[in-house]
Amino acid sequence: MIRILSRMSALALVLGAMTAQAQGADDHDQALIERGAYLARAGDCVACHTAPDGDDFAGGLAIESPFGAIYSTNITPDPDAGIGRYSEAEFAAALRKGKRADGANLYPAMPYPSYARLTDDDLHALYVYFMQGVAPNDHQPQQTDLSFPFNQRWGISAWNWLFADQQPFEPNEQDSDRVNRGRYLVEGLGHCGSCHTPRGIFQQEKALGDDDGDDYLAGANLNGWLAPGLRGGGEDHLGVAGWQAQDIVDYLATGRNAHSAVTGEMTSVIENSTSHMSREDLAAMAAYLKTLPVSDSTDIGSERRISEQKTDQTEQQLRDATALDEGARLYLDNCNACHFADGRGGSGVFPALVGNSQVNADNPTGLLHTMLAGAQLPSTSERPEALMMPGFGWRLSDKEMADLATFVRQGWGNQGSPVTPEDVKKVRNSMDAREGFSGNPEATGANHPDDRAGASAQ
Amino acid sequence: MSITRPDVDVVIIGLGWTGSIMGMELTDAGLNVLALERGGERTKEDFLYPKPADELKYGVRLKMMQRPKQNTVTIRRNAEETAVPQRHWTTFHPGDGVGGAGSHWTGVLYRATPNELALKSFADRTFEPGFLPEDMTIQDYGVTYEELEPHYDFFEKVAGLSGQAGNVQGEIVEGGNPFEGPRQNPFPLPPLPRTLTDTLFTEATQKLGWHPYPYPSANVSGAWTNPYGMQLGPCNFCGFCSNYGCLNYSKASPQTCVLDALKQRENFSYRTNCEVTRIVKSDDGETVTGVRYRDGEGNDVYQPAKMVILASFPLSNVRLLLLSQIGRPYDPVANTGVVGRNFSYQITGSIDMYFKRHQFNPFISAGGSGQVIDDFSPDTFDTAKHGFIGGSYIYTTQGPGGAIGAVKVPPRTPSWGSEWKKNASEHYGHHMMLGTTGTNMSYRDVYLDLDPTYTDPHGDPLLRMTYDWKDNDLRMTQFMAERMREIVAELKPDYHTESFKQVGDHFDPSHYQSTHLTGGAIMGTDPNTSVLNRYLQHWDAHNLFVMGASAFPQNMQHNPTGTVAALTYWSAKHIRERYLDNPGPLMAKEDPANA
């Protein structure tokens, strides 16, 4: 699966010439290194600074941007290929201001507008970790080479002046310590807004914090997938807005909760970052998110409460199985086994389709991608099972897929718009044929083991 | 060519239920564990809907099973006959690949009763001297129900067992099985929903004064997260259970309950397509030093290990011990030796009833769906009066038999063609089955050894099974047939057909009966009559432990998986708490009472 496609996220171009002070690790630093490692998880540095099948932090992942591919850099302490020569001040400038050691601007694929929130203590811990807790790696990743004018990095200064507010975090005295901790993690290292806050015409996040307008975390379109709005107090709404704090904690820790299961880009965020965070920190993030009211601009797929009556009607239609339209028939034959006639699946195992933000999203791309290619949950320490949904692209035509998607988007009171065969075709054509998890008996897998070459999993 | 791989702490032979459980337990203990699986990799992706829903491939061609051309077993009924190989599987289905039998099992998950684990003691207390046939060789397991209870309890949580407890801490619970041993906790999940056949069975058996209860099912009734954090989804009654991998994450298996958790551990690794050919003995013969195996490329590999866990199917366990010459082979004539001794099977019978007035829905089925009575267990009535030791459970299930294979037609209907079709269509949805599964005692002349004639493709002898029914067990199953006729009389079908073994019948392996093969490497407290001590540790090599139903001294009425798993946890507990700090025999050979 393509891990990161267009998530505007960490990217540091850091071929500095400055000499970093050599610091030997001693026992005293061990706790600091561990804290730095934890913070690097919270910041999900590894996701962008690691190429597919590459070594951790050695860079080389291509991050697609509207201006061309931006390649992530090597942030191991190798003095030549990595950031080994960075002083702590230079390291801080890269994280908070998007300045590399030679003074050039980083592309804002690196979420320095968010990392600007970092406290000095946390920045120090991160620095110690990257210098002493990460092994140097001399891998020289591909250089970013955007076309004119985007190769003129000085131009980013104006962008920074306009859009990166670069304020370190200040706790809000009216809020509890927990909510403040949550705000710090969500706005800062978590850089949740990179995906979940809508962007303006200059690709800037429309708000970098809740004090910056109610577009903050209001939901955004990410290559056609809905990165749903995270605002909402937990009542009377669908999707994340209707979740309780514990639902958010479960989701971030395991990729699944009583209502839903992760798909798309968020899968790797959970795998690499949030599943490694403490329950306390996740609870703080959830507590903070629950303080944000639903705003007019919040995109949670659908804003109204699901009508119980419509939920019952669809369930009855499927149970009777007498007057079925094509979509309902396809649902019974392909989906009902796990998601059931009530559309509610199995708590923590099979996601509910009723009120599901991906199902209800204005743009059906995320839903169609999942239906065509399937999906797999990350294996996390609390929930190791990498549950897999089969893709149905191999057995359903564009027309069938459109009928089925329309049924799912409108059944049980869901409020998605109809899907056309052309919509399906577009998503299908955008996919790599090898992508996903097929239930096709002729594809792979179900052959008898002795039909396969000798495999060694060691 | 021969390759030697780097040393590991533990090598596990076979990555099914017991291998997976041992993997968890011994990696928990900090050991570096390597599992060697004879068959191929098998992941959830292999079971993605609708791959498993292929009756021809899995139900008929048995693609989850060991290939007979790789390895099979020869069968004869007595020492006068010449054993011949099973060239395709009929009466039992030995699994293959990651997950083993745990991937293709039905999902009926039981405990043994306290008396079944100490059957010889029970018999000595219960019957007049001389009542048991002279050639009957039943024994106690050497481990008690009380000792196994916490391990049953834990495994039931691992598997998300669904059903109704009948005895919680000594309190009899209405609707459960009142004859079961006391359990510390209720079932993790409620029973599966009832079908019409369940309701009819329940009403009839209650009228007869018996005690119906829901089949204890590891096809789970609701979403479940187990102690390893692994997850099961609610069963949807698709019916692809026995012989199939579950397409819905609903059947407990190593894949759904253990393996993703195990694979996360850095001190665990596994290799597939690696067939162990010998367990290697040390020069002094007191221990084993590792295993030899043939990898997927045909290399002969020596894998050194500090401990070996033999965790394959019972038949494979016994064969590998015999090939490796560990433990003295059993000789039924001289009555010496132990390896291959006390092989036993399970005795089954059934009735099919036709009701024009009832419309059942056989499209709905699950392996663990059904209702059962245990009123005729070995210790619930006076079996001596009826001339046998033993007992059976009697049940109905709308269980899996395949959408096509399970179709019932009236007697004398041709097995194909337009008349079959006509009858199949008329009778579909009007049949209800009754089944019985019962104990099988062990006998002096029923055993396993190496075949003198037939070999596998590598030249190693096949395992030979010498097996026949005995009058004691046939009288038992005839008694059950009479009880089942009482149920038939209550239910008043339009007609019914019967399939029971009669006294005097001989073993006929031409049709499917059961995959519950037990014994051959049995546990006990006396090295003269058992291969393993009560901790499943080999008497003759203290760093070799042998898991699985090959340890059962005789077969119980219920399905073996629960006891197989509980014994594995029991053994693991003693390995972790006692053996690792002080490797050596956990029981003294000379004086078992001191252990």
Image (cartoon, helix red, strand yellow):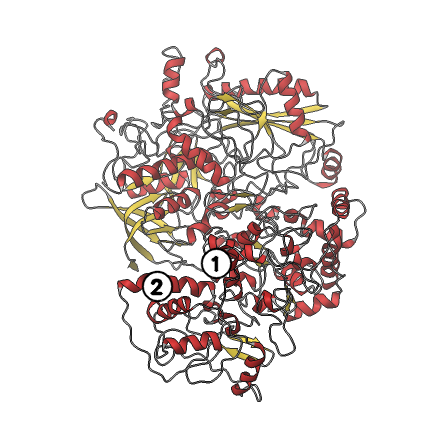
Asked if one can make out residue A317 in the rendered structure from this viewpoint, the answer is yes
Pick the front one: B554 or A62: A62
- Which amino acid, mark 2? Leu
- Mark drawn on residue A32: 2
Quadrant where the C terminus of chain B sits is top left
Q: Around disc 1, counting alpha carbons within 10 Å, would you say few (fewer than 14), some (14 to 19), or many (20 or more)?
A: some
Coordinates of residue B562 in the picture (x, y in percent): 46, 34
Q: Is A71 on the left or on the right of A83, as rendered?
A: right
Q: Indicate which disc, 1 or 2, sits on the residue closer to the N terminus.
A: 2
Quarter of the image for residue A376 reads: bottom right
Quadrant where the N terminus of chain B sits is bottom left
The chain containing the residue under callout 1 comes to: A
- Is label 1 on the same chain as label 2? yes
The chain containing the residue under callout 2 comes to: A
Instruction: Tell me the CA gap for discs 1 and 2.
Output: 48 Å
| Residue at image mark 1 | A452
- Which amino acid, mark 1? Arg
Quarter of the image for residue A397 reads: bottom right
Secondary structure of residue under mark 2: helix
Taking the spot 29% from the left edge, 76% from the top edge, the residue there is A22
Taking the spot 66% from the left edge, 58% from the top edge, the residue there is A357
Q: Around disc 2, counting alpha carbons within 10 Å, would you say few (fewer than 14), some (14 to 19), or many (20 or more)?
A: many
Secondary structure of residue under mark 1: loop
The reply to whether callout 1 and callout 2 are in contact (CB within 8 Å) is no
Asked if one can make out residue A393 in the rendered structure from this viewpoint, the answer is no
Discs 1/2, front: 2
- Mark drawn on residue B589: none
Q: In the current view of this chain or complex, which residue is farthest to the left?
A: B284
